[in-house]
Amino acid sequence: MDSNLNIDQLIHQMKETKIPEVEISGKVMQEVLSFQGNQKRQWFRMSPIWAAICAVLVISTASVSAAALLKTNWNGIQINISDRGESILIPADKDELSFKDKFETYLAESSTIWEKISADEASVQFPFPLLRPQDSKFTLVQSFGVIPKDPDYRMKTIDEWYLGGFFDIFRWKQSEVMVKQDLDGHMADTVKDPSKTLELNFGASWEYVEVTDDILAMFSAGDIENRLLVSYKTADHNVITLELWGDMAKDDLIALAKTYVKN
Amino acid sequence: MRRHIDQVLNGNLDEFEMIVRHFERKIFSFCYFMLANRQEAEDAAQEVFFKAYRNLASYRHESDELLLAWLYKIASNHCRTLLKRKNKWLLLMPLFRNEGNEKSAEQTFSDKADVQLQLLEGLTAAEKEILALRVLEDRPFQEISAILGISSATVRKRFERIKGKLIRNRNQLEGTRYGQQFEY
């Protein structure tokens, strides 16, 4: 018995299997048009990490007015801006503390949970290659990492502030900027796997800055300081989020962010 | 395809229909092979293209072959999910069996037209995928391994195992027919 011949015959028979004729393009296009016209908002239930981390919106057109509704898509991530008057960011307190001051205060109060490590230790411990800024007019005065003392630590309430990440502090003239970077697992999962979906919803205080295949950037002016959020897609399709907080003009924050992501 | 993709991303949705028309036969064939049911395969293929549309911005186009491999990947994931659900439902079926236990017209159609698909009984979803890509599409093992995310050596080993199963299935099928003939 020649089993190879049997297999070849079998495979030949299978190739001869009559596949029914089909045309699905009409139904697909109905679904696509319906999706575009009648998208329902599905609020993404933010994990505590997301509640603390500012997500970046991709806007492929011009800046958005406070009343406009904008929907767009970046690397498979659906982004919606609406005039809800809310922000998922940590709101500015009325006592006029900067993000850096609030962060350092919170870190001191949470010393049983979080610890500071040096930049060298961070470069070893962090699960992604840290983005480093090129030389510029801004002076880098301090760099450090913050990690949970317990590697398996999980935030217990939605109000808890996630402090993990790598931090750079810059000075220029009389102004100070804090830059936080961290790996964004949710965004990376969606970028890497087309079958996954992610939808983010944000308030109307945000303004488009720049969008390319690799970079999303958005700006929000605050009472005390301004904020710039950048999501950067790396060559291996991870997503690193940069958050810049400081009392610098938008263009200066953008210039500083570019020192991290431009080669 | 590059031009069509760019047009879609710039908001010209009609261009997506060109992409669907170009690949619908291949993707439907794959789903039909996996699900062994025409209506389910049609629905599945539809869903594959819809998912591709929703995630088109994240796809980095390098060649038409790569686009097809990406679509196969989506189809593979989708069909596996459907098969898992179907298996769970089949376990519950005896609780909901109709007294008449009649086949639907669809099922009858499937049975008649897809005799060869009976050869696939007992194959796992993963094995069906390999067989579909190797037999229907004549994909080389290297490419199959990239689509399914497993090593080329694993694909080859599994293909050998699949061949053994097919032979056994065919022998059983022929044995059944033989037995039926003798009933009369």
Image (cartoon, helix red, strand yellow):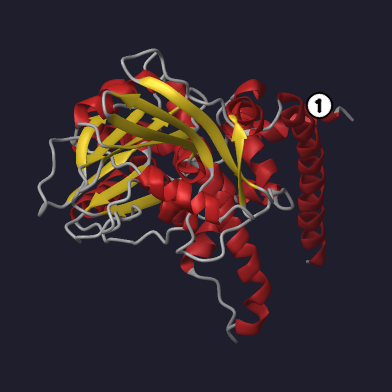
Q: Left or right: where does residue A29 sit relative to residue A18?
A: left
Up/down of A75 relative to A159, above or below? above
- Residue A242 lies, in percent from the top left, at 40, 34
Query: What's the residue at 33%, 20% (across, down)?
Result: A138
The foreground one among B3 and A125 is A125
Query: What's the residue at 19%, 49% (across, down)?
Result: A205
Query: What's the residue at 62%, 24% (across, down)?
Result: A120
- Residue A154 lies, in percent from the top left, at 61, 57
Image quadrant holding the N terminus of chain A, namely: top right
Up/down of A67 relative to B130, above or below? below
Residue A250 seen from this side: yes
The foreground one among A225 and A84 is A225
**Which amino acid is tagged 1?**
Asn
Residue A197 seen from this side: no
Image quarter of residue A260? top left
Up/down of B100 relative to B17, above or below? below
Q: Left or right: where does residue B95 sit relative to residue A176?
A: right
Image quadrant holding the C terminus of chain A, namely: top left
Q: Residue furthest right?
A: A1
- Residue A204 lies, in percent from the top left, at 18, 52
- Residue B14 lies, in percent from the top left, at 19, 37
Name the element at disc 1: helix
The chain letter under disc 1 is: A
Image quarter of residue A100? top left
Q: Which residue is mark 1?
A: A4
The foreground one among A245 and A82 is A245
